[in-house]
Amino acid sequence: MAKMGKFLEVIRHRSGGRLQPDRATGSLDQDRTSSSIDADSIRVLAKESEQDKKPALAVLYYEKIIELWGETPELWISIAQLQRSMGRYEAARDSLDKALRIEPGNAQIHFEWGELEFCQKHYLQAIEHYDSALLLHPDWSLAIARRADVKAQMVFEKKRDFEDEREKIAKAAQLDALNRLDVDQRIDSALFHPTRHELTQNHSPQFVRTFNGVYQRTRWGAGDVVRGVGSLRGHILSIVPYHRIEIYIDGQLVHEGPLTVGPVQNEQSDMRLRKYAYNVWVDFSNFSFGWHKVYYRAVGTGNSVEVNINWRIDDIIVDAPISDEFFHDSTSRVPIAGLDPSRSLVEQVRALPTVVSEASPNSYPGPIRNVAILRLDGLGDVAVSVPFFLHVRKLLPSARLVVLASADNADGCRALEIFDEVIEIDFPENPYEQGRYLTEDQQLELMEQLAPYKFDLAITGMVSDRPRQLSVMTGAPVTIGFDGEDHKTLNVYYTSRDAISGANILNYAARYGLLANALEVWLDSGARVQRRDDLSRDLLRPYGIGPADDFVVMHTGSRIKATEWPGYAQLANRIVEQTGFKVVYIAHDESQRPYLSAEALSGGQIIFLAGLIPFDHFDAFLSYCSSFVGNDSGPGHLATLRGAKAVRILSARLGGTEWKSEMGGVCLYRRVPCAGCGPIPISRQEECTYDIACVKDITVDEVFVQVAKQIAHRDNNVSEAYTASPTPALASGDMA
């Protein structure tokens, strides 16, 4: 009786005091058993647990009702439904079996058994149970419908399997035909359209992390590095439902929140599988620099802990934030100064202003004042590198060039009189092993020696692996060099081959020249305005654009639908109302027309164009507009190529400079810790978990301000810096 009393006290506590014993009559024991807490009261708590996505707790409530007041088929059915939702199929079978022993003629039990078999893809068994339910309840529409669903699923899977086999046979025949002697063997089967079977796979339940930081080499080792405000992203693939993620760093709970649910892309056969995604923003500036343990726990309908299924442990490195001078355009650079502990990190990040980035052909990520050039090889390498050295000096006339030279070539470097300083490093080559080596003490001494130089850029000229590893020891935040495992900022990969001997046909002077050329285009891409002389403004007359009309072009579409900005219609209405300019509104289809001002449409102030128009007409709109507004899409790049003043709205899925405008106008983007999600929004929007906030948080007011600035100057001319064809003088020592 004491055990039962304790249970009732727990029930009263969970009910928030709503369920109280009747103290009017009876002894203490009678109060515990004959109180207002009855089976119906506990059933209410069970239903609330179901609604709160706590099925395991609901099962406990139902089992307690059975223990105290006896079993019924309905109770076992409720338990079986919950167990089925948790993926505990054997337990659900046991519960239904107990219900069936109580009442063999209960149609609901047979129906639930059919549901259990259906979710496990045991289709024939499911039909048998639905048939049993229909024998007991012949006109039961739900059972009839579910039986039809099973039949339809069986037909669908048979057709799909047949199509898979047909595609396999056709592909095999196609590949077999390539083996004929009369077939041109340059035909590449990799270009053939893949079959559905090749495009899909059978995923297994697993815990997948998609981002834990950027892999880098640090003083603490090589690993996933996070700095300042960052993001942890991933998902759980499971048939069993999950609804919450808990993340601990070194045992400290840093996040507890919901998971978002989406389909598993390219799943081959099991449509029950779901993706439960998380995208968590964390202020890592609160943690010490160095290694930390990250523990993930996905909370679902059961209490089991399965490593790499619903539980995961990872290691990350917390490092110091990079100076604000470097990577300023990074979409993930979230300022941490002045963070308000009284507000959530998400609220503060989403309250930040939108970044307005001016167009520029320069995509180099910072200043270039002090440059380290690593030339730790032989004298011959220095001799053939002279064109490379001279090119770098021309590109950076005011920068301080310091060459790190081996004892083998230091005097040769000094004799060139190109460098501001030569640092000689005792880095001899072993003539028998053809390698160069430094002890631990020598490497530590080298890093201490280089630290005071505060290098902004390190250019690693060597091709061999070991000397390339020294680039990280310079301390430079930006590094350039040939491919390797030292995780440089810009890796240059090259391969050349003599078709006769297979030997390398790119001489060493040309190879080193690739590094200087890479720096040159980093400083200036060479993009220039290209206007068409054959496009007449008269092409626009049939659309309602007169010779003296000022107009703004809006192209609202994008190849990546998830990253389309939603404010175009509101912006168009505002431009017409507040500026008097016409708006040429180009949309994919008619779906956006109802959101535009009916008066402006009928009066010709908004010219709505849906679908494709002739390319020359489209080109003329871009060439003669006063401003262009669009997403990160092809029309925006064509507009800037024609010299249009563009306002382009970028998502944070890529870097802030990768697709920004080079010749005119501005790009608008948001700073978010999860920037760099890459192709995720294309087909897996649910993995964002913030509903693409990096685009949708850009306000109509912010875009309108930029458009208003552009149309205030109606000449539509671009600066001489962008129209001149020769390459202008490049970066000085102050700023690249």
Image (cartoon, helix red, strand yellow):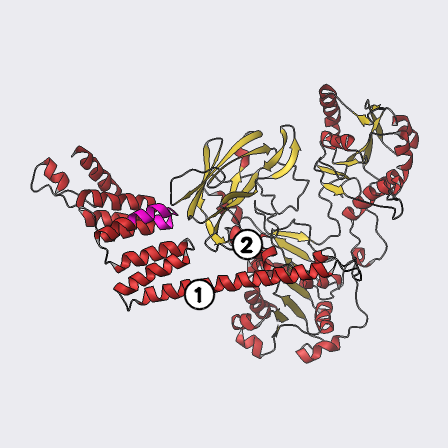
As displayed, is residue 637 above or below residue 13?
Answer: below
- Mark 2 residue element: loop
Task: Answer with left or right where residue 405 lies relative to residue 95.
Answer: right
As displayed, is residue 650 above or below residue 596?
Answer: above
In the picture of the structure, the residue carrying the numbered disc 2 is: 684
The crowding category of the residue bearing disc 1, from other C-alpha atoms within 10 Å (few below 14, some 14 to 19, many at least 20), is few
Where residue 107 sits, quadrant-wise, is bottom left
Residue situated furthest front in the rendering: 181
Mark drawn on residue 39: none
In the picture of the structure, the residue carrying the numbered disc 1 is: 152
Whole-percent x and y of residue 576? 59, 70
Magenta segment: 83-95
Sequence order check: which comes first, mark 1 or mark 2? 1
Quadrant location of the N terminus? top left
**Residue 47 in sight in this render:** no
Whole-percent x and y of residue 175? 70, 59
Task: Identify which residue is drawn at 74% across, 41% down.
Answer: 491
CA–CA distance in space, label 1 to label 2 = 28 Å
Q: Amino acid at mark 1?
A: Ala
Q: Amino acid at mark 2?
A: Arg
Task: Identify which residue is drawn at 78% across, 50% down.
Answer: 524
